[in-house]
C-alpha cells in the first residue's frame, strides 16, 4: 500500500525520506517533487525497478529514462568524457531546469532503455529530492504520469494516475514552475536544443557563446 508524506512538516519529511530510501533500495518506485514537475523515480542501477517504472508509465524502451543526480560532480562518474560546454552549462544552470544528453560511461552497469550509449542527466533544484539523491545516489526519474496524460504538478495528480504502483509519495507542494526542463543534446559537435522548457534558449546560447539560431530546436519531445 502506498503512503503519502507531507514534506512541509519536519517529522513527516524525515519519515518520508527514510521510507523513500528504503523503497528505492528494495526496488520499488517513489514519486517525488522537483523544481519542474513531479517525478517517478527508481534506482538507476536496478534494471527491474527501471522496467517497473516504464511499465507504470505504459511507456516502451524506445523512450529511455533520464537520470537525476544530487551534485555537480556525480556526472564525472556517469559520462564518457565531460566536454567544456557541459561544464559551462552545469555551472550556469545546475541545480535547475536544464537536462543534458551526453555519452554515458561504457562501464556503467545500468539499463535505462534503448539509450544507444547516451544518458540524459539533470540536477534538480528541490531540497527534498536533493536530500534523497545524496542519500541513495543517481535515480532514474521520468515525469510522474502515464504517457500521453498531463504531467503531474501536484502529488495528488501523480497519485491519481499512478496509484498503488508507487510505494512512497513525497508531497513537496505544487510544482514551483510546472514546466518541463529544457533539453540540450551534447552528443553532437554542435549542441542543439531537443526541447525548450524551464531554461530559455537565449540563456543557453549566451553561456555557450553562440546564437540561439545555431542551437536550433529539433522539435523532439521527451518526458
Image: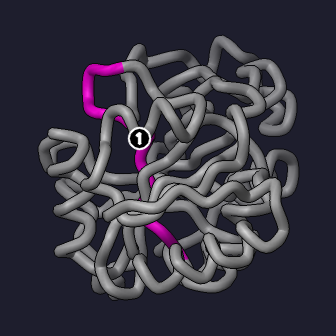
Residue drawn 38% across the image and 73% down it: 44
Residue that carries the numbered disc 1 in the rendered image: 159
Residue drawn 25% across the image and 71% down it: 49
Local secondary structure at mark 1: helix
- Is 199 placed above or below 75 here? above
Residue 44 highlighted magenta (yes or no): no
Count the numbered circles shown: 1
Q: State the quadrant of the N terminus.
A: bottom left
Instruction: Report the magenta residues as a range.
Output: 138-149
Circle 1 packing at 10 Å, graded few (<14), some (14-19), many (20+), is many
The answer to which of 85 and 6 lies nearer the viewer is 6
Q: Is residue 223 visible?
A: yes
Across and down, in percent, residue 119 comes to 41, 58
Q: Is residue 102 visible?
A: no
Across and down, in percent, residue 71 comes to 74, 72
The answer to which of 22 and 211 lies nearer the viewer is 22
Q: State the quadrant of the C terminus.
A: top left
Across and down, in percent, residue 103 comes to 42, 62
Residue drawn 66% across the image and 36% down it: 36
Which color scheme did the rendering employ for the protein? Answer: one colour
Across and down, in percent, residue 209 comes to 83, 33
- Is 197 placed above or below 144 here? above
Amino acid at each position: 500500500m502506498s503512503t503519502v508524506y507531507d514534506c512541509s512538516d519536519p517529522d513527516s519529511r524525515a519519515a518520508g525520506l527514510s521510507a523513500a530510501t528504503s523503497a528505492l533500495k528494495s526496488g520499488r518506485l517513489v514519486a517525488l517533487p522537483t523544481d519542474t514537475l513531479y517525478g517517478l523515480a527508481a534506482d538507476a542501477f536496478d534494471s527491474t525497478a527501471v522496467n517497473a517504472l516504464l511499465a507504470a508509465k505504459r511507456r516502451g524502451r524506445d523512450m529511455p529514462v533520464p537520470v537525476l543526480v544530487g551534485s555537480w560532480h556525480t556526472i564525472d562518474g556517469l559520462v564518457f568524457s565531460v566536454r567544456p560546454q557541459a561544464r559551462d552549462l552545469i555551472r550556469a544552470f545546475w541545480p535547475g531546469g536544464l537536462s543534458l544528453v551526453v555519452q554515458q560511461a561504457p562501464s556503467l552497469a545500468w539499463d535505462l532503455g534503448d539509450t544507444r550509449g547516451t544518458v540524459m542527466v539533470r540536477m534538480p533544484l528541490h531540497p527534498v529530492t536533493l536530500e534523497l539523491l545524496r542519500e541513495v545516489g543517481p535515480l532514474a526519474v521520468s515525469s510522474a504520469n502515464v504517457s500521453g496524460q498531463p504531467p503531474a504538478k501536484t502529488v495528488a495528480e501523480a497519485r491519481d494516475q499512478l496509484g498503488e504502483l508507487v510505494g512512497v509519495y513525497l508531497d513537496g507542494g505544487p510544482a514551483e514552475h510546472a514546466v518541463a526542463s529544457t533539453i540540450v543534446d551534447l552528443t553532437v559537435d554542435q549542441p542543439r536544443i531537443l526541447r525548450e522548457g524551464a531554461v530559455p534558449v537565449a540563456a543557453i546560447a549566451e553561456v555557450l557563446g553562440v546564437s540561439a539560431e545555431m542551437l536550433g530546436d529539433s522539435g523532439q519531445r521527451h518526458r
